[in-house]
Image (cartoon, grey):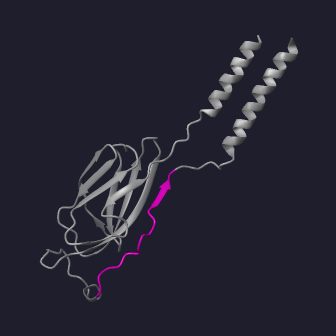
Amino acid sequence: MLKKSFLLTALMLVTVFSIQVQAHTKLESSKPNNGEIVVGSLDTFLLTFATKIEQTSSFEVFKIDGSSVEITNIQIEENKMTGTVEEPLPSGEYKVTWNIIGADGHPINGEYVFAVVAEEGTPQTEEPKEEQKEQAPTVENEEPVKEKVSEIESPLFVIPVIVVLVSAIGIGFLVWILRRK
C-alpha cells in the first residue's frame, strides 16, 4: 500500500511540475523595420515571427492619417507572412498592424511604423504637401514594437500557489494512508 501511495504522490507531483509555460510568439523582424525610413520604392512587406503562425493571420498598412493602403496577395508560410501593394508607396509615414494566431493558439496583435521617401523619378500617386517637400518624414527612432496578447494574463503568484496546494494535498494524503495502518 505504501508503494501505491508513493507512486500516486509522485505521479501528482510530476504532473504539477510539468506544467508547460507557453511563450507567445512575437514579431522577430520585418521588412520594412520599425522606425525605418525607406528611400526609393516599396511594394513588398515581410513579417517574420518567432514561431509558426496560422493561415488566418493577417496584416494591414495605413497612412499615418488613418487611410488604408490596399494589400494584395498575402501569403503565409510557416513563420513568415508576406504581402504586396499594386503600386509602390508614395512618400509619407505609415503604420503596419498585424493580427496572428501563434503556434500556441493564442491571438496576438501588434503594430509598428515606418516612412517612405520616394526617389525622384519614382511615380507617386499623390502630390506631397509643401511641408513634406521641405522636410523628409520623420519616424520616432526605435519605438518599441507594440505587441498585445488578447487574453487575460494570470498573476505570477498563481502557479506557485497551486503547486504548493497540490503538494500539501499529496503529502496529506500520504500521511493519512500511513496513519490508517
Residue range corresponding to the magenta coloring: 135-150
Please give the name of the residue rendered at 71% of the width and 23% of the height, measured from the top-left corner: 9
* Count of numbered circles on the image: 0
Q: Position of residue 15 (x, y in %)?
A: 62, 28
For the point 79% across and 22% down, which residue is it?
173
**Measured along the vertical axis of the image, is residue 108 above or below residue 13?**
below
157 over 98 or under it: above or below: above
Query: How far across and how far down the image is residue 49, in percent?
Result: 38, 50
- Name the foreground residue: 67 vs 109: 109
Q: Quadrant of the C terminus?
A: top right
Quadrant showing the N terminus: top right
70 or 117, nearer to the observer: 117
Placement of 108 over or under 6, stated as above or below: below
Q: Is residue 142 magenta?
A: yes
Q: Quadrant of residue 113?
A: bottom left
Percent across and percent down for residue 3 are 73, 13
Quadrant of the image occupied by residue 180: top right
Q: For the stretch drawn in magenta, what is the main secondary structure? A: loop
Going by the image, does 7 lie left or right of 101?
right
Residue 5 falls in which quadrant of the image? top right
Residue placed at 74% from the left, 31% from the top? 167
Is residue 156 magenta-colored?
no
Q: Left or right: where does residue 131 sit relative to residue 5?
A: left
